[in-house]
Each structure stands twice: as structure tokens, then as C-alpha cells.
Image (cartoon, rainbow, N blue to C red):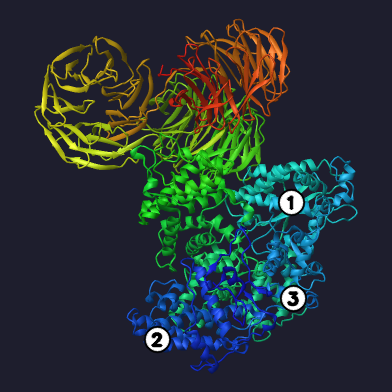
Amino acid sequence: MVVGAIGYLPHISATVMQLFVEIEGFKFSKTMGICYSKPPQASTGKKYDDDSDIEDEERMDLVYQSVRPTRKHDPSIAPTVKRLASVHLPEPPTDGTQVREALLRSTVVEALSALLSPKQLKHLGSLAVALCNETSDRIISLKKNKEVPSEAARALGEKAQQVAQNGKTVTFNLTPSNSEGIEEAEELIEHTFSAFRLVIEATRKGGKGVILRLLNCRDLAAGVEEVKQRLIVAASLANLIFNSPNSEKDSPPQLLQSCKTEDAADFWHENGFGDLEIVSLNTLLLAIDAWVREDNDLQLISSDEGIYFDLASCHNYETVSLDRFLDFLGSASLITDAVRDCMNRDEYLDSLDDNNDSSPTGSKETLEKPAADKIMNKHYFGLLQNALQPLSFGDDFVQHQKTYIEGTLAWVFHEFEKWAAFPPGKEDRRVLWIKGGPGIGKSAIAAELVRKYGTRIQEGGRASPSGAQPLIAAHFFCKSSDASRNNPRKAISTVAFRMASRERAYAMQMRTLLENEIKRRMLRACASGSEGTVEETFDMLIGDPFRAAMKRRGAGAGDVLILVDGLDELVPGVTRQQILQLFGRQLLSLPSFVRLVVTSQETKDIGMFLKRYRPYVLDVHQQSHENDLKIYLQSVILPSVGVSIPDDNDTLVSSIIDQVGGSFLALRLVHTVLQEAAANGSLTLSQVEEVLAKHGHQLIDFIYKSILDRIQTQLEEASGGDSELLLMLQTVLQHILAVLVISKEPLRLNDLHKLCCGVRIQSKALTKRLVRMLSPLFSALNKHSGIEPLHQSVKEFLVDPNRAGNHVVDIRLGHATLATSLLTVLQENELLEAPWELISPDRIHDNLLHYALKYAHKHLGQCMMALVEPSASGEADYGWKNLAQLALQQWASTFICSRTAEKKAIVAPKSHQPSSTQTSIAFGAWMLLQTHTMQRKRVLVGEFTALSEAGQQLRAIGEITDSTVMLFFELLRDLQLLYGAHWAPCSTVKDGVEMMAPHIPVTSQLYHSKGWLTIGAISGSSRLTASLPVSIALRPCLNTMVGHSGFVFSVAFSPDGERIVSSSSDKTVKLWDTASGETINTLKAHTGYVWSVTFSPDGQYIASGSDDKLVILWDAAVGAPLHNLEGHSGSVRSVAFSPDSSLLVSGNSDKTIKLWEVDTGAVVNTFEGHSDWVTSVAFHPGGQHIVSSSYDRTVRVWNTITGETENTLEGHAGFVTCVVYSRDGERIISGSDDMTIKIWNPIEGTLLLSIDADEAFVTSIALSYDNRYIVSGSHDATIKVWDAATGNRVNLFEGHRDYVLSIAFSPDGKRIVSSSDDKTVKVWDAESDGKITTLDGHTAPVCSVVTTADGSAIISGGEDRSIRVWESATGESFKTMYGHDDAVVSVALNSAADRITSGSRDMTVKIWDFKTNSILFNLEGHTGGINFVTYSKDDNIIASASKDKTVRLWNAISGECLHVLEGHDAWVTSVAFSIDCQRVVSGSDDKTLMIWDVSSGETLQIFNGHSNNIKTATFSPDNVHIASGDDGNNILIWNSTTCETVYSLLGHQGAIRSLIYTVDGRYLISGSEDRAVIVWNTISGDMVNKLQGHGEAVTSVCISADAKKIVSASDDLSVKIWDAAPRETIKTLEGHKDWVACVTYSKDGKYIASCADDQAILIWDTVNGKIAQRVSGHKGSIRSVAISHDSKKLASCGSDQTVKLWDLQTSQLIRTFEGHHSSVTSVAFSPDGKFLVSGSRDFAVKVWDVEKGKIFHSLYEHLGRIFSVQFSPDGKTFLSSSHDNMVKIWDTHTGDVIHCLEGHSGRVWTATFSPDGATVASGSSDKTVRLWDTTTGKLCSTFGGDGGAVTAVAFFRDGRYIVSGSDDKLVKLWNTLTGELVMIFDDHRGFITSIDVSPDGKWIVTGSGDKTLKVWTPAVF
């Protein structure tokens, strides 16, 4: 890195001093890009360059002299060389390449400062030569060093001679006027000194250690290679200097020469402003900031609003004129003094005070009086600028002004004024479109329009009759190479800021917002993207304030004109669509006086977006434009090469104009070519013609090639024939070009150097030289500006091998370079170290850090994709592949680290211990920077997806083998599956962390890792890991899209899968980006629920159907409505396009189907035939048929042309809700609320397959594009995937909290999108295994399976004769045991999990050592194959059942046979021990069960009752029952004592092969030949779960000890792991149409009362679960109900602000209590029924006298909304809980507060008294349940702390148990004495709203957001 300067200096350079306060001792501090603190300063000299400090008295002239190379050098240099040989070298730090470079440079600078006199400095060129000559001379001694190969030493000597050859040509007299010469001198000396000292010290003892450490080399051989590379750099630099002509910078303008400020001219010159008299405001601020930075009091002045507004005029916030700069300087002697004077002034003068109208209540005339700059004075503009962070286009204006020719564009100005003068309200005049091809000068036109019409403040923009000019109030310049200028939020904030400086009324409205701190924060949050969608940002910043401001506008106010340049430069993708919609729809949705000026090429999407406004088109390709080209040619180009053309001869001019094709860009390139041709003198007309004739009509490409050819020639000359040197130069140039081409934003020169330099060798001077060579193609306006291409066509040329040929740039190299170097930038700036706090966005000042955080990982993703794609043969390789692999390794090793042993011991089941690696602190810091500092929450979703998918592809092709990189891929996959679904939708980092934490699998590298703990600690989250049971698998939800405010009825993918469209009950249609989940657009035109939406197959259109009876056809690109299709008389329920997108079909509640023509919107046909609502329609893939479904329970197939019904498919028993065609058209799939999916033959009308949909209404279905899978959505809030051939369920996705209403597959089949009543859209990974894990490995049917007690492993036996052991968490097989000679049909495991017993058809039983896999005993004696083996519960005895009709009992320790049990007449198929180990039961093909005494072997009982062969039998855990299954599909439950059948279980359709009880005996699991596993409730005999997914018979089932997982084995060769999820629900009560708000039991237990948001009160009969009564009368949502203690009265309250009293028997209204001023949330009876207490959102608690109907107390002690109220059992007190985090206990008689229960850290949703009144239980959003003593008011205990907010609590009658409900959908039962969590109920699909316990304590009733009530039985009672 180049730092400092060479000279006779008392101090080393400022930059060096920033890095090292003291050379000796090496105390250093890296210069930071974060504003933690000011960097240390040392030098006080004036600043003349970023990297140098030079005292005035030491200024000297720099000259370049060509001196013949010589071996001799100035004798005066010899002593210096000698002393440099022994100068002290400081010990370097242990890390930091750039730090070591700086230390080496500073050491040389300091040494030379001490050794050389000022006169000797001019001989530094000779010094470089001398050092190289000395190096060459000493090579001989180096060759003798055995550590260095002689060949390496010889090569080093050659390179030293190359530097000496041209190094002497650079002699130096140092002066600020040429700081680049100083840099070059420094580099030559540094590199030659490094070689010199290494060679000197190679023979010294111990001396070489320091120089090697400074060079960061491990040994001498590496050091030689290092200095050799340094000499190559030095030789390249010296040769380039030698071969380069002198180039003088433009002199500063004359005005600066006479300026009183001494350093003004030097400042202007040093910053590259040259002869400019106008500069960018932002660039000037940066330049001043750098110039005065060495003064500690003047740090970061660019953020000082006083200086900003002193330099800016009130009319122009883009550029600064030289005159204004001089005004700013005033009479100050130095620029530093001028800055200090400005910062000390009180610049915040409120101009409104001067006008006496600062009050917002003034009259309209008064408020409109001041101009916008008076309303928005410096202070408020500073606030607005800080909030919005608008973009500046100053550099664009300066650049265009440099090329502007006076006299041109007059025709544009005329047409513009003509258009602007049109009266407002004319829709065909709202847009002026200036269009033309590339390089035509559109941006120059736009810049001149802004300069001429946008730099004043006036009231409006339309030209008035008085001749006032129009005003451009705001402007935005798009640019493909700058991501910020492709950002819709930046466009909104920039336009808002500009308008506030021009439009008075709008400025006043914005000031009002700024005066409110909360609104000011919201402005910033929306502008930055941390809050709201793009549309909401528009409304917040422009739409709402502008509409409000319009009320203040005067009647004569002009139009508001907004200019947008370069719409065609927007990069394709989401942001392009959003910006098009912003300018094409949202801005123009404002009043008609808001008008738009657009410049662009004519593209399809821009044309579509503009055509609806019938724009006034100004085509640049016309005669007037050609005249401008001629003016430029004749007045500038030809005179510059000495050519003058007679007025009567313009043939040459016309020829040139024709050759450039009307392009200003091509004409400027012609200028370049002619200037080169005229380098030796003026040209003649014929010479001009000759030069241009060579180029033909491919002029631009030819000139680009010529420039690159010339650069190549220069490099060859500079290499002097050295191939190694030439390769180095070409490689560096390729890196520079590759980075310039692919960079997302323009990079400054210093930043470009940091990113392009090699891993260790850094030459800034060489970088500058090469960039200067490229200046005809890439250049910066000044040293503070980014380097940009001459035109977008430069990049297009360079990446096109057909155009660029051998000059083509490999973008892969650019991505690999940036992926590596940007990570280094983050590391060296310490951003990836452990943070102390969340870093706010305004603390990242450095542009390069911004770039690194936004794009480093995206460049890494491009590297990964490049590695996936095969390289073409013959491609030039500049090392991109190695660099890309290096980048991957660096990112992986940065984000992944080892997990220490002590950290691995986390409380979890043994099989679920964390991985051996974890995410690092660097990862945690990076995530916090992304999500908080950079506010990139949503954007990361798509980026993680892209990275993960690239990683999976790399893994699949085996390109990467590095283990750390493979772990990095796993981390990316985890982030893909977790981040978008849980973190991204949250508004804060803390919320995101807490939402994501419970879902992190314990085996993930995220789990309890350094990175995750860092994130949690810094974000303030206390919930970092899930509670047990831990997660063992990732949910497949990739993204959750939140934005609709109503139910989301329909979703669909775009044909390319990049967008999703959804429709909702909120009457809108939304477009989403699939990858990120960001809202692209919201389409508003419907006035009713939008039931259906879809994309056309060509992607051009969207169609939507609504309750408003309309079908609307939208332009998919810009979201504009194209046609309103009218004709239906009811709600449009479904829409679908024909395959060719020419037709649209719609189905309606009016029972008809209509066919529409897309182009015209005309009705083609109406189909009639259904007798009820049409619910769904779809086209045949060939377009000749349409299929429809209906509430009439039929599916119909229609002929598209005739409209006739060709087939009616009948068979559904309920409403048919959805229907689709298969992709080949050979099948129709329909779904129904009869809980089935049916597959039909559409031609024959026959049913092919019926699928049982797991007892859930099917709401939507979709078919994968390969026809293999059906996906369905249902009322149980789940998404299921089915095998379309077999009907087996293969996947289950859970995550929605309410009905799933719509479902769709992505075109590539990798994604599923769903929508729900929960108002969300979710994207799922279709390839994820969901709840089912399949263990594949056996090569023949699997006969038996068993799990370890802790659930960590699964053991299976199969017909392939093997026993396999599987890891439960991963599904991987880690042991395989062979030993049997035939099928292993049964396996068993002892409780210690150290022995496995297996039985085989080979007639043997084997006992295995689990750890060693060795056989301990081979038990022989059976004369037939073994059917079953099992252990007794004490592990002492093994029982085996055999085909020899016997059961044998074996000693499990010794292997001795204890008994042979004989008595069966056929094969014994099953055997099981009782829990007490005293009995054993056997089942046989003789259809009997027999119970035997274990100790004696005698028969105790025989059970007869089966009519088929018995295949399995088992004892219940309490020994009371025996379950047995036969091959006739029957399961019988027996009393084990009486031998009587208790009941039978019917549900299987095949033989029962396996039975097992859960540990608590509440459930029985069965496996059958019908391929299903069924879970049964043993109390009621009901089927509670049916698990389908196997392809063949289920042969064996077992369950984990925690009853969470069921494992099954099958003849399909697989073992599957299922989520057991047994349900304890006894009844589900359905009847409400909206979420249930409250439930309560009557005191006699006969009734349950419930209320809901559907305005209904339902009274349920607790015996039959049916609705006994309906009570209605409230005018809004009902929030609470209560039943009096005598069960005669009912009280209710709701959002209508009333409390109502009802007769419970008659449902008649008795009385209405009014007095609350907001929604009443809770109501309760006193025990004697005399009083009611109510709580409300008006913060009030009221006690009512029931008889009198009057208020007894009105209590206003709470500071927030009241959520719950309740009387104590004795009625003497009552309680209330509130939003203010408190519970208050009141005296009923006096109304006084007795106790205030404080302790919750969140709002208290619920509180209740214990039955004895001694305790209060409260539940809060802090996720805890707390118990309080009612006597003392003290806290007794706290339960919970994880899960969700506690929304409901209730006591059991004995007070020993509490039941709580929360918004995580769980109901929990707690022991109040121990705090132990006893039980969890998880059957609800929505948040829990209310809980009550029946008076007898046997039942729990819960109400939920899923619209149901559920009645539960707690088994503990």
C-alpha cells in the first residue's frame, strides 16, 4: 500500500502516522471506516495529497529526465547505500498485511529523511539504481546460501538489473505539484530496499528474521520469491514511467490565482478539478474534509450541515460554482480557517420567524407566502437530508456541462416549453418521453434541462401566459453501473428531497413531519428500507404529504414536473419493476398537475408502461439533433485537428454524421481518433477522410479495440521483452478491467487499488498508471469520484467475446477478486470482530465498507456459480478458478470455527448434540451489520437462497472437496431455510432472533454457537436456544411474506418463477419477489374481496376475479389495469388463462363460466350447466377444453369452442373446491371438502384414484410440472404432498396458523407457494422431507425396527440378512451387522442399549454387543424360522416365537434356554412380556392368544375371539389390557384377567403386522399391510392420527421414549420416522366464522358460552357438543362473555362499547350498560350476581349494579388498556390486568386499590383468582405465568419464560394445577406447587385466546384464532 512521501521530513507521512503513532515500540491503530473515535494524528503540515505531508520550505520541483542507463551512480549516494545496509528494522506486528506494508514504507521514509540532505533528494533515482546494482552484486554470496536455490537467486539478480535499467530515469525534486511522482519514487525505493536488505542479511546470523517478518515470509526461499515479485513491480513501474510521455494537469482557473486564501489554488489542483469552474457539491465536501482532516477539531466536516448549506445555493443542491466556493472562503488565509469560521457561526436562522408565520394555524395565504427555501431553512433541510439520505447527481452535471456545446439543444428547450405549456388535466400530455438509441446524448439533454429549468424556486412548473419558465421540481438519474441508482427507495427519497426544495406547500408539510421526532424516525426508517414496503415508503415520503400539501396550494400554482433520466439503464429485475411502477403509476396517481419527463431507449417494458399515458414523444433521431451534431463537429472537433471546411462544402460533415449514426458518443470517439492522428501536426480534409474510412460503420467497436491494442503495445514496450514482467502487467490490467466491469457501484481509485492488488504485493502507483492508460474507456471526474465507463456500451463490448476478441474481460475473475478482497476489507477494519453494541447506519462512513457489506457475499455467490459452470476450452485463464476457490475457503474459515469440548455439552438427547463446528463471532458480527446497520433484512432472504443453491450445486458436482467449505454450504442451507421464514419478517433484530431461535436444529452450526450467542447478546435477546425437546430437523419454509391485511385467497407463480402474485380479502392484488419476499407492487382497483389471481403463461398479464363481479386484466410489468371485464352477476371465484395467453376463463357464483378474449376484453362464450357456485376453472394444456368444479359436487369438462359439456365427473360427497389438469392433459385432479382428492380420466370420465386427505377439507391443489406430485392445502393449516401415482402422502409442511386457501408449484418444481387465512404468503422448499424422514439402505424388505430409549438410534432388520443401526437426527446408517444366513425378521434392544437380539428365518437367535458389533451368543434350538424376539422389561429374559409352534424363554445374560412353551397349533407370530415380567403373551396363526407364567412355563389363559390368524400382540403398560391384531384387518383390546374383549379398533384395510403402546398407555400404534400407520386413543377407541407414506406393507412399528417420534419399517425397503403428535382433543366445536375471543363454563357444567369476532355468542351443550342457542345483538366484535353463578344470566361486551345482560334460558336481552368510551374487552359477574365488572380500552374499570343498571364505580388507575377482569370467590375484591404491565386488586365496596402487582416486563393479557382466593395467576407477553399472594401482593413463583405470549390462564378447582394458553398455539398444564410443566396440548392451529376449566375439573375448554373451541381431557386426572 502506498503511504507517505519521501523527503527531508521531521515527521513521517500523515497516513503512516495514522497507522503508527510510534515507530519504535510499534504502537499502532488501524484507520477505521467506522466513526468509533477520531484516528490519531501527528503531522501539522499542510495537506497536499491523501498520502503526503510536505513542509513549505522543503517544496521543490519534480522533473522527469531521460538518463542513459549506467552501472555507475552518483558517489554521494554510496554512503547512504552503506548506511541503509545496517539501518534498524522494527519488529512488525503478527498480522495485517497492509499494516506490515505501511511499516516497511515508513521505515524507509524515516531512514532516508535521516540519511539524505535536501540536495541529495534529487538523486533518489540513482539511489534506486544503486540499491539494485548492490543487490545484483551480492547475488553471488546469496547463491552460496543453501536455503535458496541458485536458479531463484539468478532470477532475482536479473530483476534487479531490469529496475536499474530504467530506474535512473526518475530523478526527484519533490513538490506538491506532482504527488504522483512522490508515490512512484517511494515504491521504487521500497521494493529495491526490500531486495537489497534481504540479500544483505541472507548471510547474517539472525538478521534475516526481521526483514522476513516484515515481508511476511516464512523462510529465506519465500523471501527471495517475495522480493523478486517486488522487483517485477518496480521494473514495470520504472519502464512505464520511461515509456510514458509527460502529461500536465490542467491549471486551476485564473480566479483562484488571485484568491486571498493561500492554499485555494493548490487545493483545486490537487483534487483534480483542473480548469473546471463548477464541481459536484458532495465531491467538494469530501475534498475539503480530506484537506483539513489533520486538524483534530475539524473531523468529518462533510456531515456538518452549516458547511453543506453555505456551499450549496438555496436553488441547487447538486453542484457548486467557483464563485460560490470563493464566497465561502471569503478573506480566510487558509481553507482550514474558512471551515472553522463556518462551523463556529450560528447558521440556524429560522426564516419563518422573520415572516411571522411559523404557526401552522395561520391562514392559507400566510402559509404560502414564504418560498420553499424559507420554509425549509438550513436546520430543517439538514434534518430532511439526514433522514432521507438523497442521492446527488453533481458529477453527472459537471461531466455533461464539460461536453455541452453552446448553441445546441435549442430545439429540445423549445419542445419542452411547448409541452410544459399544455393545460393541466390532459392525460395525453402528462408525460414527455425523450427517446433515442444508445450514445445519442439523452442524459446530456436531461442534465441541461435540469440546469436550465430546475435551479430556481417558484410556485409551480407550467409556463404561464406571462412567459414564466417551467420548473423541474425534482429529478432522478438512473445508471446501470450504480446500484443505488437502481434503488426504488433512493428514487423516492431523492425526489422527495428535491421537491421539498422547490415546492412551497410540500415543503411546509415535510417540515411538519420533521418537527415530530417519531415521524422523523419513520421517514428515515422508510427511506432506509428498515420499515415498510416500497409502496408504503412512497405514501409516507411523497403521496400522503403531497396530497395534504395540495390543500395549501394557490389556485394559480403551476405544474409539478419530475424528470427521470435513463429508465432503460435500470438493471433487469425486481428493482427495475419497482422503479417503473413508482414513476409510471404511483407518481402519476397524484393530481394531474404532477407531470413526468422521461429519457430512455425504447424497450418493451418501458413502452408498455408509458403507452397508457399517451406520451408526448420527442424522438432524438431527427433533423434538429443532426444539426447539433454538425455544430459539435464543425465548432469543436475539426478545428482541434486544424481542419476548416468552407460553408458551401459540408459533404465531409454529412458523411461523418452518417457514419456515427446520430450518436454523440461515436462522435466523441471520432474526436479521439482524429486527435491521435493529428499528434504530429494538423490534418487535411483528405487525411480526415482516410482515417475515418478505415473504421467503417463498426466505428465504436473499432475504436474500443484500437484503444486496447494501444494499451497492449505499451505494456509490451514496458516489459522490455521479459515475458514474466509482461504477464504480471497483463494480469494486473485484467484484474482492474474485470473489477471495473462487474462492480455494482463506481469505485474510487484508492478503493480500486485496494481491491485489485495482489494478495501481498501492492503497487498503488502502478495501479494509477494502468488506470490512466484506460482513461479513454474508464475515467473519474476527479480524485473523489468513482471510475465509470465512458458509456454503458464499453462494458457491453468488453464482455462480448464476439466483439472484443482477445480483449474480452472475464467477469469471473472480477467476482473472484472482489469476493476475496472485500472480505479482507471487512476484516482489516475490524468489522468482523466481537461488537460492543449494535452499530447504527450513520456510523459507517467509508464507501468501500458500504460496498463490502452490500456486495461481498453476492460476488462470492457469482464465484460459486462460475465454478458450477464448465469453462470453455481455449479460454484465457488469469487464475480466476484458484482465486474463486480461495475466496470460498476464506469465507468458510471466517464464518466457521471448531466447537470446543466444553461448549459441546449442551442439555439435549444424546443423538442431538451440536455439531463439532459452529458459526464464529465473525459470522455473528456480519449478520448484525447486515440486518441492523445496513437494514438489509428482506434482501438477505434472496441472497441466502442464491448462495445456498449455488453451494448445493457445487456439492452435487463434486467440484469442492474442502471440508470447511462443505460445512459452509450446510450453514448457507440452514440460513436459507430459517432466516426468511422466521427472522426476516420481524421488524427488529431482537424479534428476529427470538423468532428464529426455537427453530434452529441442535445439529446445526448455528445452535448455541459463538456467532449466534454474539447476535443474541448484542441484540438484547434472552431467548437464544429452544427448550427441550430440541428441534432435529429444519422446517422447509423458506420465506414468509407479510403485507396483506386480510385473508389471502389465491397465489400463483410467474412463468419464470421469479415473482409471486397474491389476492386477498383486503381488496388488493400484490406482487412479490420470490427470492427476497419483498413487495414489488400492490394493485388496487377492485372494490370487493379478490378471490382468484393468476399469471398468463407468457408472463405479460395478470388476471384477478373479485366479489365486485369484475375480472380485471393487468399489465404484469407495471401493474396497470388494462381491461375491466364486466358481465358476471356474482362473485368471480376463479380465473385461468389459455396456454397461448390469448383467452381467459372465469368461474362465478352466478353458476356460469365466461370465456374472454385477452386483447379486446370481449366475451367469447358463456358456459352454463352447473347448479351451484363455480369454484375453480382450468384450461387443458392444449387449450381445447376447460375443466370446472362447483359446489354442486361435480366436475365438468367443457369444449372451449362450442361451450358444451363433454363430461360430468361425479363422485365427491361434498363441495368440489378446486380442480386442475395434469401437464399432459390426461388426468384431472379435484379436491373437495369431503376430505378427498380424486384423480379422473377426463375422456372416459372414470375415477382413477381417490386419496384420503387426512380428515381435512381440501381447499386447493396443484400438480408439479413433472406430474409426479400433487400438493394440497387444507383447513387443518397444513400443506401435504402426495405421490400422484400411488396416492401416498410423501410430505407434510406446517407453519400456517389458519386455513391454507391456495397453493401452487414453481415452474422448476423446487418451490411451493401457499396462502392462508392467517394473512401470510409462504414459500416452501418442495424438495424438503418435511415431517417424514426416510432411511434408505436395506436392499430387501425391512422386517423389524426398534429405537434406543433415548431416541438417538434406530435398529432395523431386513430380508437382506443385515442389521442396520441409524442415527435418528440425520437418518444416516452408521453400523451394519451381518451374521445370519437368512432374513432377519425381528430385532430387540435391551434398556441399557448395549445388546441387540435378532431372530432369523435361519432358526437362530443371536445376541450382539452393540459397541463392538460382535456376536455374544448364538441361541439354537428352534426347528423353524424365528418370527419375533423381545426382551423382558428387566432385561433378564429373552422370548422368541417361531414357526415351530413354540415360544422359547432364554436367559439374556448366559444364553441358556429356560423354558420351551408348547401349546399352539400353528406358527407363533408374536410374543410380549407383561410390565411386571411375570407373564408373557403369545399370538399364533391358530387364531388364539395364550398367556404363560414366566417362572414355571405353564399356560395360564387362552383367548379365543379372532376369526383370522393373529400376527401381533402386546400388553398395555399397566398390564390390564392386551392388544392383538390379525390378518383380517382387526385389532382387539382384551381384559388380560377375564379374557373378554373390551372393544375392537377398525380402520385398517390390510393385515395388522405390528402393535405397540405408548409408555403412558394412552395411545396404541398399529402398522398394517395397507401401508398405513394409525395412532389410536385407548380411552375412546378413536383414531387420532393416520400416517401414510410407505409404498408397501408396514411390517414393524416402535415409538421413541418421549413419544414424539414413531418409527416404522416396510417391505418398500425403507424405514420412516414420523412426528407422532398425538392429540388429546375429545371434541372440536365448530360454528364460529371468526376467531374465538372468549370461552367459559356455566357453574353447573351443562353449558359452554363462547363469543367471537363474528358478532355471535354461541351456547354449547357440553354433553353432545352441539349448539344449544345463538345470541346476537352486539353491533361489533364480541370480546368477552360471562355466566352468572346461578347459571341464569349471561353478560357480554364488545367493540360497540357496551356491556349487555341476557337471560341464558331465553336468550332475551335484559339490559344494556353504556359508559365506556372504547371497546370493552372483559366482563365478569360477582359471586352473588349483584355486580358486573368490566374493563375497556379506554383505560377504565367499571363496576355496575346489575339490578339498577347504573355505574357503581368508575376507576381510572391503570395507564393502559384493560385486558381482563375477575371477581374473587368471596366477591370482596376484584382484579384487573392491563397493557401497563400490571395487575391491580381492588376493594369491591370502596373501589380502592389494595395491591398493585408489578413484575411483568410486558403487557398482562390475563389474570385470575385461585378457587380459594389466596392466589392470583397472571399471564403476560413476557411469556411467563406468575403467581401472587393476594394477602401481601408479593410474587410467589414464575413459570415458563419461553414459547409465546401468555394470553389465557385458568385454575383447576383444587388449585394444584394451572392451565395456560399462548400465541404459539400451545396449551400448557402446570403444577402450581413445583412449577413443573405437566403436559402440552398442541391441537389448535391458531393462537389461544381464552381458557376455562369445567367445574368438576375433568375438562378444559379453549378458544382460538383458528375459529374453533376444543374440549380436552388432562390425563393426569
Residue 962: horizontal and vertical position, in percent?
36, 57
* Image marks 3 and 2: residues in contact by CB distance under 8 Å: no
Identify the residue under disc 1.
383
Residue 10: horizontal and vertical position, in percent?
62, 79
Given residues 1457 and 1037, the one toward you in this image is: 1457
Identify the residue under disc 2.
139
Q: Label 3, label 2: how many angstroms apart (C-alpha)?
A: 49 Å
Quarter of the image holding residue 1070?
Answer: top right
* Quarter of the figure that contains the N terminus: bottom right
Tag 1's secondary structure? helix
Given residues 147 and 1277, the one toward you in this image is: 147
Circle nearer the N terminus (3, 2): 2
* Image marks 2 and 1: residues in contact by CB distance under 8 Å: no
Circle nearer the N terminus (2, 1): 2
Residue 1401 can be seen in this image: yes
Q: At 41% across and 79% down in the image, what residue appears? A: 207
* Quarter of the figure that contains the C terminus: top left
Residue 1136 can be seen in this image: no
Q: At 39% across and 26% down in the image, what residue appears? A: 1251
Quarter of the image holding residue 1787?
Answer: top right
